[in-house]
Amino acid sequence: MRNASQLLRRVTAAAQTKLERRQAPVRVLATSGPLVVRLAVSEEEVHAAQRLRYTVFYEEMAATPSAEMATARRDFDRYDEFCDHLLVIDEAAETRDARVVGTYRLLRHAVAKQHGGFYSADEYDLAPLLKKAAEGLSLMELGRSCVARPYRTNATIQLLWRGITGYMFEHGVDVMFGCASLAGTDPDNLALPLSFLHHEFLAPADWRVRALDARYVPMDRMPKEEVDLKTALNALPPLIKGYLRLGAHIGDGAVVDYQFGTTDVFIILPVDRIPERYYSHFDREGVAARSRG
């Protein structure tokens, strides 16, 4: 009976999220030429983001779709119904379906608590972060990020992050986190970048999220003195390097994700670690004032 009641509450909450998304005003978070960053405001736009994810994850990369995903040609899971979907939209695109050229999935703690938790809890024990939340910090999970091939430039990535920054200020987020991936499922082939992340960026003990025991893969595969820092840094994907530049910590242990053909590491980014120069172009006071209004 309890399980039925919990399911009913989740279904009701998901339906409410869909209704709120349909009723949400179109509010632009950032622009650059014809590119606009904002949240999805309709199921159609969420589907467009899912189609982009399918193209990138399953057609360009090594992910294996379910039969249902392959038929729909969309990447989706239960979290899509209640997450916010940040979109980069090319308003000059010739067709409507080609308009969504970048996306990030955002899940705030207040929303996750209503829907059974965070996506990354399937791979990591989030207890240290949940303790921070109990102490008053506001959490947000980042995930499912991708950009269409012709738009994979620093300018597009920076535009996405301007959108995340605006969302972060609006909702008073203190800590961002999520899984980030290295291509490949053999940790021994990734010994250099994994060891580099472990030795140089391991989170302090009170922040140290750890991979679940059943999925834990040691990252310290090489002694620290054998790690060539420059070579290791060059071996990292641009997204992980970007997180590190912003001040991110790395959790304890990697996780092999065979569906996506990747080895995942855990990113922890307290907002107060982000360098002030990153905000130099952004009107934080204005965003805060508008969010209160």
Image (tube, rainbow, N blue to C red):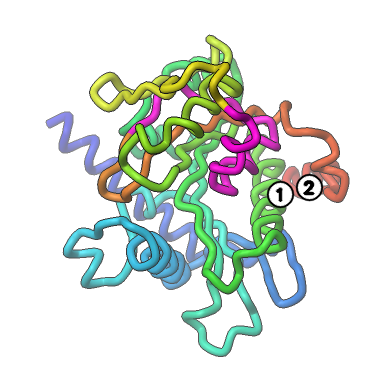
Q: Mark 1: give few (<14), some (14-19) or many (20+) Cα within 10 Å.
A: many
Picture quadrant where residue 120 is located = top left
Q: Residue at x 37, y 21 (%)?
A: 218
Q: Is residue 126 visible?
A: no
Residue at the spot of label 2: 287
Q: Is residue 11 left or right of residue 172?
A: left
The reply to whether callout 1 and callout 2 are in contact (CB within 8 Å) is: yes
Does 218 sit left or right of 230 as displayed? left
Tally the numbered discs: 2
Q: Residue at x 57, y 17 (%)?
A: 225
- Please give the range of residues in magenta: 228-255
Q: Is residue 118 left or right of residue 129?
A: left
Residue 254 in magenta stretch: yes
Counting residues from the N terminus, which is met first, the one under dot 1 or under dot 2?
Answer: 1
Most extreme residue toward the left, as rendered?
1
Give the vertical position of 241 relative to 215 (above or below): below
The image position of residue 236, as x and y in percent, is 55, 42
Query: Which label number is shown at residue 128?
Result: none
Q: Amino acid at mark 1?
A: Gly
Residue 99 visible? The answer is: yes
**Residue at which label 1 appears:** 166
Nearest the viewer among 262 and 2 is 262
The residue positioned 80% from the left and 42% from the top of the image is 278
